[in-house]
């Protein structure tokens, strides 16, 4: 190992592993505003275990999970890990990376030093009895999200991942393009393809909340590739037009409606009448955007508290509302009159397993899915960019930052 690190945007000789590295670090005492929570520090380079790969990070993707980590909400990820035995008093986040394999554990066989890779965010115990019994790894007791629940994420010059998380980088993409979409894309793939009985099919109608965001842009493309008709929910006509460019057949501007949040109690007849009227108007707007009177077979959810009541209301009988987050809050009220009698499914979805991640990455490699890179930032801007994400001020699409790549546009072959 080398005794000293190198500046951001510079790599040591291939395979030479320094003892220290530069990272964007969150500590418990700084949690709150992401602009203050993240700080550049010099920390040790992680050492690969037998099944691990050390990656020289060329670019890192920005996701909402590290807004939560920076704020310490709903959990302090550092304290949770310390209770589990991790002695480190800091968090190095980042759940998307493109980079170069720099060192490998002695049991790694699929990748070698010098390989160009991206990383998916599903992590679990390799000997977990739940998984060995044939169950889905992402429902296992040991499952975690890399770069959020785990340390050693992509907001550093080097990151550590399990071999099974690695996938070949698409050759036609730059480093920053390749780093941008994997977390949201693999999450969206699981949501649309992972739930037997309600997987996306040719001719389905899919309603996608937050269509112009990172998650929504991938969902629109994945559903369209599967032959579905997508209606996006957005906050402006400009964002709606962007969604149509990605394949959506139409969009609904949510700012034209005001019934968001927890609806009136079912015994409040007047309140219920007012809420239902607005929810029906929203459903009619979906029909108009679609061009036919059909309800969504799948409602692709992540806002949560503000939108779940409407999503369940407008979903087709026997259809599915699938949700992976709660960006507007967690108290999601479901009116069971529109749920059990019409046999609709409210499905939680989290992360990705290997099979789903590899399938998504193949679509990217084939050029069928665009990363939708909307912004490229500098390593020093990680805190500011997370603040802007929290404020809803990032542009449409996904955002990434350069780490080992010195300038944008590198990486294509």
Image (cartoon, rainbow, N blue to C red):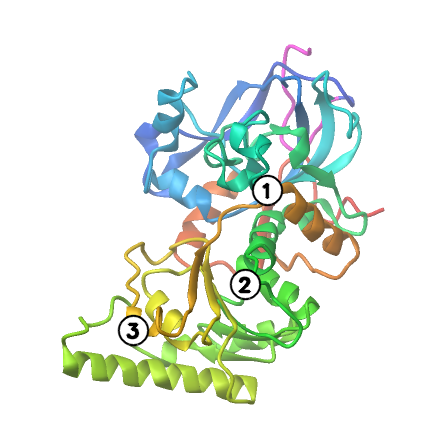
Counting from the top left corner in percent of width and height, residue 42 is at: 52, 21
Q: CA distance from mark 3 to mark 1?
A: 40 Å
**Which of the 4 image quadrants contains residue 158?**
top right
The numbered mark, 2 or 3, whose residue comes first in the sequence reads 2
**Regarding mark 3 in the picture, which secondary structure is present there?**
helix
Q: Which mark is residue 131?
A: none
Q: Are marks 3 and 1 in contact (CB under 8 Å)?
A: no
Q: Residue at x 63, y 67 (%)?
A: 223
Counting from the top left corner in percent of width and height, residue 333 is at: 28, 63
Determine which residue is flagged by label 2. Answer: 216
Counting from the top left corner in percent of width and height, residue 269 is at: 15, 81
The numbered mark, 1 or 2, whose residue comes first in the sequence reads 1
User: The magenta stretch spans which residues?
Assistant: 1-12
Q: Nearer the viewer, mark 3 or mark 1?
A: 3
Determine which residue is flagged by label 1. Answer: 96
Q: CA distance from mark 2 to mark 3?
A: 29 Å
Q: Nearer the viewer, residue 393 or 217?
A: 217
**Regarding mark 2 in the picture, which secondary structure is present there?**
helix
**Regarding mark 1 in the picture, which secondary structure is present there?**
loop
Determine which residue is flagged by label 3. Answer: 337
Q: Are marks 2 and 3 in contact (CB under 8 Å)?
A: no
Q: Residue at x 59, y 30 (%)?
A: 132
């Amino acid at each position: 190992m080398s005794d000293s690190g190198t500046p951001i945007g510079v790599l040591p000789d291939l395979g030479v592993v320094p003892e220290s590295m530069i990272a964007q670090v969150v500590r418990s005492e700084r949690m709150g505003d992401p602009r203050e929570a993240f700080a550049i520090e010099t920390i040790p380079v992680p050492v690969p275990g037998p099944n691990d790969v050390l990656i020289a990070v060329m670019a890192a993707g920005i996701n909402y999970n590290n807004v939560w980590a920076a704020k310490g909400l709903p959990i302090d990820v550092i304290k949770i890990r310390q209770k589990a035995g991790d002695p480190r008093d800091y968090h190095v986040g980042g759940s998307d990376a493109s980079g170069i394999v720099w060192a490998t554990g002695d049991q790694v066989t699929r990748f070698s030093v010098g390989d160009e890779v991206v990383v998916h965010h599903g992590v679990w115990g390799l000997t977990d009895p739940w998984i060995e019994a044939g169950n889905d790894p992402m429902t296992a007791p040991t499952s975690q999200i890399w770069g959020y629940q785990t340390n050693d994420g992509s907001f550093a010059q080097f990151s550590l991942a399990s071999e099974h998380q690695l996938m070949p980088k698409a050759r036609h993409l730059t480093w920053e393009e390749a780093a941008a979409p994997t977390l949201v894309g693999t999450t969206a793939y699981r949501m649309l393809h992972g739930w037997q009985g309600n997987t996306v099919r040719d001719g389905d109608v899919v309603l996608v909340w937050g269509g112009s965001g990172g998650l929504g842009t991938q969902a629109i493309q994945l559903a369209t590739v599967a032959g579905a008709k997508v209606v996006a929910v957005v906050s402006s006509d400009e964002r709606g037009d962007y969604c149509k460019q990605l394949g959506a057949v139409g969009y609904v501007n949510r700012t034209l409606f005001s019934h968001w949040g927890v609806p009136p109690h079912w015994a409040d007849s007047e309140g219920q009448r007012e809420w239902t009227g607005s929810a029906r108007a929203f459903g009619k707007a979906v029909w108009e955007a679609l061009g036919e009177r059909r309800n969504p077979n799948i409602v692709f959810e992540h806002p949560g508290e503000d939108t779940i009541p409407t999503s369940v209301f407008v979903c087709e009988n026997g259809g599915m509302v699938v949700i992976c987050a709660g960006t507007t809050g967690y108290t999601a009220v479901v009116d069971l009159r529109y749920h059990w009698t019409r046999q609709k499914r409210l499905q939680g979805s989290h992360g990705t397993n290997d099979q789903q991640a590899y399938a998504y990455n193949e679509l990217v490699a084939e050029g069928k899915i665009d990363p939708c890179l909307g912004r490229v930032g500098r390593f020093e801007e990680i805190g500011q960019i997370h603040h802007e994400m929290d404020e809803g001020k990032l542009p449409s699409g996904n955002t990434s930052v350069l780490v080992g790549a010195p300038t944008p546009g590198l990486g294509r072959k």
